[in-house]
Image (tube, grey):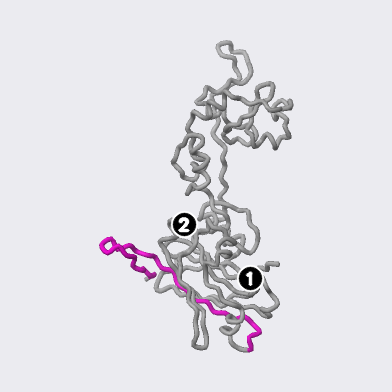
Amino acid sequence: MTMAMELDSIECVSSYDGLDEDEIPHDHHHHHFSSAKPHNAAANNNARGTGIPGPPAIAPANSVHELLECPVCTNSMYPPIHQCSNGHTLCSTCKTRVHNRCPTCRQELGDIRCLALEKVAESLEFPCKFYNLGCPEIFPYYSKLKHETVCNFRPYNCPYAGSECSVVGDIPALVSHLRDDHKVDMHTGCTFNHRYVKANPREVENATWMLTVFHCFGQYFCLHFEAFQLGMAPVYMAFLRFMGDESEARNYSYSLEVGANGRKLIWEGTPRSVRDSHKKVRDSHDGLIIQRNMALFFSGGDRKELKLRVTGKIWKEQQNSEAGVCIPNLCS
């Protein structure tokens, strides 16, 4: 069983290399994103030309996009589009959710397809569903669905690893969420010095220590540390994730180091994007891995208590346009 370590199991000293400690923006409001679209306010209850109240007018299809809006989930409908015998339509995903009953008139839906509306849908171009998060792209139907699975503007999942968390949002919202809701350790600076402590470490096969978030180069990085079984061997693993996309993560490098008694282990690598789940990174062994016996040796004493000091630094790779090589740029 995975255990989340308490805050007092970590001692942390962060060094800032001369950087002024920037206050991390404090935002008590979580970001919630709505896919609701504005409705045409021109519809009214007067029958055209008579002044007599009548049924709501159908919005001139500024648009067709509104005709393609599913009445259940309010998302745009794509083939297959289903309809009841009275002509009310809904998307294929919601057809199963309403148990084959029309949500408008409660008639049984059956397997009637609205072929005319499907043809209309296939002929239109749609904005990416993440347009309200900044994506400017517009696509034909089939291209849109493929794009949205990899859109750089899609929300990020919460990177907290101590428990299952379903919160999603942009990076500023997740930073506030990690600080305010998960109470994670927040530090400014690109060098760090942590000591991970656990009594009776041989009794714990799987454990996750509290996440630490670093703010440097105007970006956020998550430091993970945990214990698990690698085959038959109990190990500890430390690794860094970048709070952004993989293309941005490749601009940075980091190192982790543990050691004592004249011996040390050093890991250098590129931080993984939080688009890759914590479990995916751990299972790929992309980080500093220390066998438990070695970790206890580094802890000193009688080797019955884990007191492992992990030091590290983050730097940005700067491209030298003349030589075509990367030059490390440390915080200064």
Rendered location of residue 124, percent (x, y): 49, 30
Q: Nearer the viewer, residue 13 or 26?
A: 13
Q: Nearer the viewer, residue 27 or 256?
A: 256
Residue behind mark 1:
231
Label 1: how many residues lie within 10 Å, few (<14), some (14-19) or many (20+)? few
The amino acid marked with disc number 1 is: Gly
Q: Quadrant of residue 298?
A: bottom right
Q: Secondary structure at mark 2?
A: helix
The answer to whether residue 34 is left or right of residue 322 is: right
Above or below, comparing residue 17 to residue 178 in the picture? below
Task: Read off the magenta span.
Answer: 302-331
Q: Residue at x 47, y 55 (%)?
A: 245
| Residue 214 among those drawn in magenta | no
Rendered location of residue 220, percent (x, y): 48, 62
Label drawn at residue 246? 2
| Residue 330 among those drawn in magenta | yes
Q: Secondary structure at mark 1?
A: loop
Residue 189 showing in the rendered view? no
The answer to whether residue 83 is left or right of residue 257 is: right
Q: Residue at x 57, y 25 (%)?
A: 117
Q: Residue at x 52, y 48 (%)?
A: 154
Residue at the front extreme of this rendering: 231
Above or below, comparing residue 52 to residue 307 in the picture? above
Q: Quadrant of the N terminus?
A: bottom right
Verify CB contact (< 8 Å) between mark 1 and mark 2.
Answer: no
Above or below, comparing residue 92 to residue 20 in the picture? above
